[in-house]
């Protein structure tokens, strides 16, 4: 885990509410796929224990849909773990309908709301170096 980092990249066109939703959805999947990112439990001064949080930062960056497509392709080339959030994810609350909608769209035609990436720290920094913070 020492050399692994993660980043969330959101589509620059997302309004705040949809951006926060996309970041939350991507982050939940990142945590599920990479439980090693979760730190030890937090214990307060009264001895109350709380679930651990991630002990490293998660940059939330911004990219256009075209940049997101390029990043998805580069993630495949570099064997990064990429978590994609297509636009259809915010068009329904029915996960089955979401899956079916995505199944109807070719990879090259997907519109991306966001992307989570896990990879080696230096390589991930190099991949995302030109992106600015979201917001």
Image (cartoon, rainbow, N blue to C red):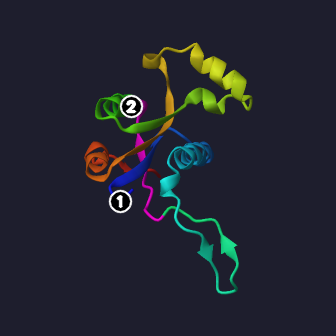
Quarter containing the N terminus:
bottom left
Q: CA distance from mark 2 to mark 1?
A: 24 Å
Residue 69 lies in magenta, yes or no? Answer: no
Instruction: Using residue 77 as the reference point, say whether residue 47 is left or right of it.
Output: right
Residue ID at (57%, 46%): 32
Q: Secondary structure at mark 1?
A: loop
Q: Residues within 10 Å of mark 1 (few under 14, many from 20)?
A: few
Which of the two residues, 70 or 18, is positioned nearer the viewer here?
A: 70
Q: Nearer the viewer, mark 2 or mark 1?
A: 1
Residue 109 spot, x, y in % from top left:
47, 17
Quarter of the image where one finds residue 92: top right
Q: Which residue is mark 1?
A: 2
Instruction: Using residue 94 as the reference point, say whether residue 45 is left or right of it.
Output: left
Quarter of the image where one finds residue 21: top right
Q: Which residue is mark 2?
A: 72
Q: Secondary structure at mark 2?
A: helix
Disc 2 and disc 1 in contact, CB within 8 angstroms: no
Residue ID at (29%, 29%): 77
Instruction: Using residue 123 as the reference point, say whether residue 132 is left or right of it.
Output: right
Residue 57 lies in magenta, yes or no? Answer: yes
Examine the rendering and report whether any part of residue 133 can be seen: no
Q: Residues within 10 Å of mark 2 (few under 14, many from 20)?
A: many
Picture disc at residue 46: none
The correct choice, above or below, for 95 with respect to 37 in the image is above
- The magenta stretch spans which residues? 55-68
Examine the rendering and report whether any part of residue 47 can be seen: yes
Residue ID at (36%, 52%): 4
């Amino acid at each position: 885990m020492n050399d692994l980092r993660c980043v969330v990249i959101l589509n620059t066109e997302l309004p705040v509410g949809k951006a926060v939703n996309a970041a939350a959805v991507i982050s939940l999947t990142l945590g599920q796929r990479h439980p090693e990112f979760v730190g030890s439990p937090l214990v307060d001064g009264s001895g109350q224990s709380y679930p651990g949080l991630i002990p490293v930062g998660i940059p939330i960056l911004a990219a256009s849909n075209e940049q997101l497509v390029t990043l998805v392709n580069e993630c495949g080339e570099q064997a990064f773990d990429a978590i994609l959030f297509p636009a259809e994810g915010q068009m329904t609350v029915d996960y089955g309908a979401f899956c079916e909608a995505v199944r109807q769209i070719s990879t090259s035609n997907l519109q991306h709301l966001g992307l989570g990436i896990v990879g080696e720290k230096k390589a991930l920094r190099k991949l995302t170096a030109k992106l600015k913070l979201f917001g």
